[in-house]
Image (spheres, rainbow, N blue to C red):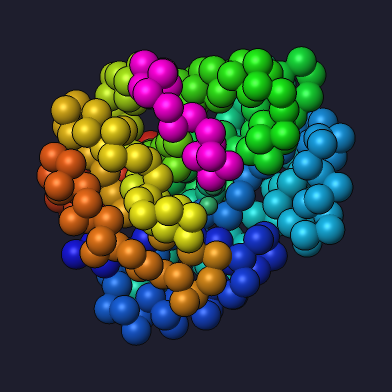
């Protein structure tokens, strides 16, 4: 059984527990290490996005930044805390980020500078937002769109996933079929987009997470059984992610998910300290 998670969130972003509290729980679970991967979401128009007013009401404004300076300041203090904790921790602590990738030159330049400065250990690729007609849509905005627009947005979503995979920035991809969160993209017609994306992920040498946070909505993780079978066919390495926003969620549904993955043909589970180490964006490697 996997004894770590690289996909977790803490206070200061949208998590409910501090780094220390997460570490205590990881120790209780007998884990070898934990990675913190708070949201890195920067876009100049993010505060004009339709969802932003709801984000404010829900207390989620912490995770959205309209400038790189803003997000760098948040990560600086978070990473400083990790540096402190590393001095006394028995468990290995990694500095991660869950990054919303935008395929614009401005974003890429800003991101490159931010990474050079912050030096994360690994990066998770994600697409919580879809930029379309100069507007940023999150999953709930897609849900509220008209049917033809929804289909366009879903196509755009998969294009974004492929662009992120091809960027070479990421260690693994988060919750591939995120849009099923709002009941979208599950029909057979989307299997082609999924397969195309899996092909790009394979070519890019990325791993894919099996994200157990979907269990609060359904009887599977992200991604679906259909995508799991594609991952198995391409022999893409997978790892379990709890996407924990609280210490109590660490390791949630790992056993069920590993079983389900195996039932769908997956047996390439990422193991740190083996030859398939995590690729660091800054050129170092982890796990051996
Ligand atoms: Zn996410
Ligand atoms: Zn997350």
Quadrant of image for the N terminus: bottom left
Residue in view at x 37 percent, y 41 percent:
223
Q: Is residue 109 visible?
A: no
Specify the quadrant of the image occupied by residue 109.
top right
Q: Relative to residue 201, is residue 268 depicted above or below?
A: below
Q: Is residue 116 left or right of residue 247?
A: right
Residue closest to the eye, 243 or 259: 259
Percent of width and height locating residue 211: 40, 51
Residue in view at x 38 percent, y 75 percent:
26
Q: Relative to residue 41, is residue 160 depicted above or below?
A: above
Q: Is residue 140 left or right of residue 17?
A: right
Q: In the image, is residue 54 part of the stretch drawn in magenta?
A: no
Q: Relative to residue 150, is residue 213 depicted above or below?
A: below
Percent of width and height locating residue 194: 38, 23
Q: Is residue 75 left or right of residue 31?
A: right
Residue closest to the eye, 60 or 216: 216
Residue closest to the eye, 151 or 200: 151
Specify the quadrant of the image occupied by residue 99.
top right
Callout count: 0
- Kindly report the secondary structure that dominates the magenta region of the rendered protein: helix
Percent of width and height locating residue 176: 43, 36
Q: Is residue 52 left or right of residue 205?
A: right
Q: In the image, is residue 179 part of the stretch drawn in magenta?
A: yes
Percent of width and height locating residue 228: 26, 37
Residue in view at x 59 percent, y 75 percent:
18
Residue closest to the eye, 149 or 64: 149
Residue in view at x 27 percent, y 78 percent:
30
Specify the quadrant of the image occupied by residue 141.
top right
Which stretch appears magenta? 178-193
Q: Relative to residue 269, is residue 246 depicted above or below?
A: below
Q: Is residue 264 visible?
A: yes
């Amino acid at each position: 059984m996997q004894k770590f998670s690289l996909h977790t969130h803490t206070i200061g972003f949208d998590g409910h527990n501090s780094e220390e509290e997460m570490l205590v729980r990881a120790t209780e679970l007998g884990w070898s290490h934990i990675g913190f991967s708070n949201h890195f979401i920067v876009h100049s128009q993010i505060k004009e996005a339709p969802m932003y007013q709801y984000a404010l009401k829900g207390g989620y404004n912490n995770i959205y930044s309209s400038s790189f300076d803003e997000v760098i300041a948040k990560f600086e203090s978070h990473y400083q805390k990790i540096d402190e904790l590393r001095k006394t921790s028995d468990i290995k602590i990694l500095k991660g980020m869950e990054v919303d990738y935008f395929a614009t030159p401005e974003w890429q330049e800003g991101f490159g500078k931010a990474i050079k400065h912050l030096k994360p250990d690994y990066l998770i690729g994600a697409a919580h937002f879809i930029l379309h007609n100069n507007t940023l849509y999150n999953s709930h905005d897609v849900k509220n769109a008209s049917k033809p627009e929804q289909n366009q947005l879903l196509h755009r979503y998969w294009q974004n996933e492929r662009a992120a995979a091809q960027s070479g920035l990421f260690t693994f991809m988060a919750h591939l079929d995120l849009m099923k969160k709002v009941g979208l993209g599950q029909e057979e017609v989307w299997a082609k987009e999924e397969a195309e994306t899996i092909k790009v992920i394979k070519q890019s040498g990325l791993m894919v997470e099996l994200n157990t946070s979907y269990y609060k909505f359904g009887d599977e993780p992200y991604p679906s059984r259909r995508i799991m079978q594609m991952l198995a066919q391409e022999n893409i390495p997978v790892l379990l992610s709890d996407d924990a926003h609280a210490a109590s969620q660490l390791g949630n549904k790992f056993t069920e998910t590993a079983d389900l993955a195996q039932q769908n043909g997956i047996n390439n589970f990422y193991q740190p300290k083996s030859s398939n180490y995590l690729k660091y964006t800054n050129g170092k490697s982890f796990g051996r």
